[in-house]
């Protein structure tokens, strides 16, 4: 099955980082007004003044953004002081929406920001903005159609087999995740929880003591201490690549929504864990040697039952039996049985949704998957059902309408929504201090890691040259 996906894979399919390009339509500039002859002199004067100002701005802005006050070579990587080889640690705080870092004082996370590199307006997740597709995109550099994990739950239309978050059969997991790439190069990798890390494929066999089987009940502090113990090993036993995963603040976001005080409490706890990690590394003399990437997989938006679109409300135009629906929300996925015209179903659904007679109908638009916006990169896989609905921010699709009014939080929506963005904070010898970079998609991270570890990565959807815009050149001894 891997060949079905990899055959269409290109080595570089970066998304635009221009904020306007993240929306389905762009605003076109108005044509410039014609200048009258009487205004020519004033216009020339304006051009000269503007040119002088632009020249000043151009040359002043061509300097590296936010150069470090602590370094005389802001764009040079720093030599290792204790470790004998590069180490990259990726920490995922599930559901850490961009903006949570401003809710309260977070001394440890802010320390990483002040002395590291941050995506100024957050990290852009892939679509759908769900946990498993995004975590696997981060470590493979692939969009979901190419790495195979198109949702948290889905059905293979050929075999009928069902994927869930406990599925470890390698047939589901395509591409080369970073732990496999690292292992292929004879280096050690460790994973303290990460979707796909327990899958034995290629040279990765989930080695004992280096690959922890997922267990949600393991205290966060125990996870941090276990990772720190790697730095007590002989130098050649220390993994070159490590992952660390926390379920929060995703749990609180789902239960209470992104604006609840319990989100702030959860973020404070994550900050304390980062502090525990930093202190442990400092005690071992390795903190400045380790390249730490702190990120999330997606954001979070508030939802309430009154913001519901019910498929049964479309019965006047077309009936959608629940047996056809593989997922309702925030990604509506429909696979009708053979013999039904998918294009006719899409047409009838959109007719009803746009009629004004379906409650909240304007907040759902349905597509044949091949007609989805190209920026979503969500069509090139037979696993994706033929009909996909994009749900409005904070809205929910159900089969039938209920009378409940309970509120909470959700994610999985269009990755153009800022509410779906998460954080990217990188600290270490290969990241400039006090630097801000424009937002980018998480498929770019794979090439950053391989660049730091000085190994060749597998083909992926990130841009090899993009890594140069975030990662500092290697230090020359």
Image (cartoon, rainbow, N blue to C red):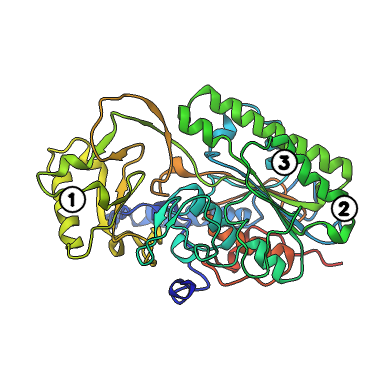
Q: Is residue 49 left or right of residue 344?
A: right
* Neighbourhood count class around disc 1 (C-alpha, 10 Å): few under 14, some 14–19, many 20 upward: many
Q: Where residue 440 sits in the image (x, y, percent)? A: 53, 54
Q: Where residue 472 sits in the image (x, y, percent)? A: 71, 60
Label 2 secondary element: loop
Q: Where residue 251 sits in the image (x, y, percent)? A: 53, 34
The span from disc 1 to disc 2 (Cα, nearest Å) is 60 Å
Front residue of 149 and 267? 149
Rendered view: 75 above or below 423? below
Instruction: Residue at 25% x, 40% y: name it.
Output: 399
- Looking at the rendered image, the disc whose residue lies closer to the viewer, 1 or 2, is 2
The span from disc 1 to disc 3 (Cα, nearest Å) is 48 Å
- The answer to which image quadrant residue 453 occupies is bottom right
Instruction: Residue at 12% x, 38% y: name it.
Output: 357
Q: Are marks 1 and 2 in contact (CB under 8 Å)?
A: no
Of all residues, the one furthest to the left in this rendering is 316
Whichever of labels 1 and 3 marks the residue nearer the N terminus, that label is 3
Q: Which residue is mark 2?
A: 233
Label 3 secondary element: helix
Whichever of labels 2 and 3 marks the residue nearer the N terminus, that label is 3
- The answer to which image quadrant residue 284 occupies is top right
Label 1 secondary element: helix
- Looking at the rendered image, the disc whose residue lies closer to the viewer, 1 or 3, is 3
- The answer to which image quadrant residue 220 occupies is top right
Q: Which residue is mark 1?
A: 350
Name the disc covering residue 223, or none. Answer: 3
Whichever of labels 1 and 2 marks the residue nearer the N terminus, that label is 2
Instruction: Residue at 42% x, 46% y: name it.
Output: 412
* Neighbourhood count class around disc 3 (C-alpha, 10 Å): few under 14, some 14–19, many 20 upward: some
Of all residues, the one furthest to the front in this rendering is 160
The span from disc 2 to disc 3 (Cα, nearest Å) is 17 Å
Q: Is residue 260 left or right of residue 264?
A: left
């Amino acid at each position: 099955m891997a060949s079905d996906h990899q055959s269409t894979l290109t080595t570089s399919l970066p998304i635009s980082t221009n904020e306007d390009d993240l929306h389905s339509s762009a605003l076109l500039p108005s044509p410039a007004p014609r200048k009258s002859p009487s205004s020519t002199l004033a216009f020339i004067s304006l051009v000269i003044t503007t040119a002088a100002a632009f020249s000043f701005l151009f040359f002043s802005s061509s300097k590296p953004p936010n150069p470090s006050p602590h370094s005389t070579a802001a764009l040079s990587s720093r030599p290792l002081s204790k470790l004998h080889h590069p180490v990259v640690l990726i920490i995922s705080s599930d559901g850490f929406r961009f903006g949570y870092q401003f809710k309260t004082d977070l001394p440890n996370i802010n320390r990483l920001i002040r002395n590291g590199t941050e995506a100024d307006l957050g990290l852009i997740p892939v679509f759908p903005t769900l946990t498993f597709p995004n975590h696997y995109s981060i470590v493979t550099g692939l969009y979901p159609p190419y790495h195979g994990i198109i949702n948290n739950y889905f059905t293979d239309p050929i075999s009928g087999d069902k994927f869930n978050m406990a599925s470890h059969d390698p047939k589901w997991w395509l591409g080369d995740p970073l732990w496999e790439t690292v292992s292929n190069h004879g280096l050690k990798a460790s994973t303290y929880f990460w979707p796909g890390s327990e899958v034995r494929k290629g040279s990765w066999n989930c080695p004992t003591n280096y690959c922890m089987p997922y267990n949600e009940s393991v205290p966060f502090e125990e996870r941090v201490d276990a990772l720190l113990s790697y730095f007590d090993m002989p130098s050649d036993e220390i993994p070159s690549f490590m992952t660390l995963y926390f379920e929060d603040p995703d749990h609180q976001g789902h239960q209470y929504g992104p604006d609840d005080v319990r989100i702030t409490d959860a973020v404070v706890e994550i900050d304390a864990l980062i502090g525990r990690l930093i202190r442990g590394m400092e005690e071992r003399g390795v903190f400045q040697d380790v390249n730490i990437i702190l990120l999330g997989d997606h954001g979070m938006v508030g939802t309430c039952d009154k913001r519901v679109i019910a498929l049964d409300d479309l019965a006047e135009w077309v009936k959608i039996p629940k047996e056809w629906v593989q997922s309702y929300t925030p990604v509506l996925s429909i696979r009708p049985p053979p013999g039904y015209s998918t294009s006719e179903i899409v047409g009838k659904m959109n007719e009803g949704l746009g009629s004004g007679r379906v409650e909240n109908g304007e907040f759902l638009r349905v597509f044949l998957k091949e007609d989805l916006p190209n920026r979503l990169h969500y069509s090139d896989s037979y696993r994706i059902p033929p009909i996909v609905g994009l749900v409005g921010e904070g809205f929910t699709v159900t089969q039938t309408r209920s009378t409940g009014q309970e509120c909470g939080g959700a994610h999985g929506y269009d990755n153009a929504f800022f509410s779906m963005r998460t954080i990217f904070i990188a600290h270490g010898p290969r990241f400039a201090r006090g630097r801000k970079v424009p937002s980018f998609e998480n498929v770019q991270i794979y090439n950053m890691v391989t660049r730091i570890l000085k190994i060749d990565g597998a083909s992926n959807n990130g841009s090899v040259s993009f890594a140069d815009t975030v990662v500092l050149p290697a230090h020359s001894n």
